[in-house]
């Protein structure tokens, strides 16, 4: 009888640890995506317009909702590259 109780407690502890790990991962992912979204939402409107113009001049298409350029890759370190990092 004692072994059954011990097995049940161990099983519950393993399930609890798994739930804790999943919760930590979810919280970390939400935090990372929220920071990236805030960075583009708080971007300087002048910079957004400059990046939009450069995107269109180089054959890309600009999505105004997400402030992303489709069809054009920014050079590494370019100030507009942060709009593509999400």
Image (cartoon, grey):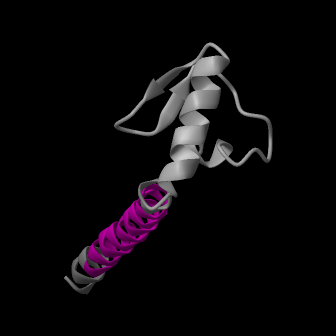
Residue farthest toward the top in the current orientation of the protein: 59
In the image, 4: left or right of 41?
left
Q: Nearer the viewer, residue 85 or 59?
A: 59
Q: Quadrant of residue 7?
A: bottom left
Seen in the picture, residue 53 relative to 17 is either above or below; the reply is: above
Q: Quadrant of residue 76?
A: top right
Q: Is residue 86 visible?
A: no
In the image, is residue 14 part of the stretch drawn in magenta?
yes
In the image, is residue 28 part of the stretch drawn in magenta?
yes
In the image, 21: left or right of 8?
right
Seen in the picture, residue 78 relative to 7 is either above or below; the reply is: above
Residue farthest toward the bottom in the current orientation of the protein: 2
Residue at 61% from the left image edge and 26% from the top image edge: 55
Residue 75: x %, y % from top left: 79, 35
Residue 36: x %, y % from top left: 49, 57
Q: Is residue 17 visible?
A: yes
Residue at 34% from the left image edge and 37% from the top image edge: 65
Q: Nearer the viewer, residue 74 or 53?
A: 53
Residue 33: x %, y % from top left: 44, 56
Total marks placed:
0
Q: Main secondary structure of the magenta part?
A: helix
Seen in the picture, residue 7 relative to 2 is either above or below; the reply is: above
Residue at 79% from the left image edge and 47% from the top image edge: 77
Seen in the picture, residue 65 relative to 4 is either above or below; the reply is: above
- Stretch in magenta: 9-37
Residue at 44% from the left image edge and 62% from the top image edge: 42
Q: Quadrant of residue 14?
A: bottom left
Q: Nearer the viewer, residue 27 or 22?
A: 27
| Quadrant in the picture for the N terminus | bottom left
């Amino acid at each position: 009888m004692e072994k059954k109780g011990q097995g049940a407690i161990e099983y519950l502890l393993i399930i609890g640890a798994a739930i804790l790990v999943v919760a930590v991962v979810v919280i970390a992912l939400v935090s990372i995506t929220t920071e990236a979204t805030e960075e583009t939402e708080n971007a300087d409107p002048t910079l957004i317009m400059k990046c939009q113009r450069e995107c269109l001049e180089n054959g890309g298409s600009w999505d105004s909702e997400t402030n992303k350029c489709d069809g054009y890759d920014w050079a590494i370190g370019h100030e507009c590259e942060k709009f593509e990092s999400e």
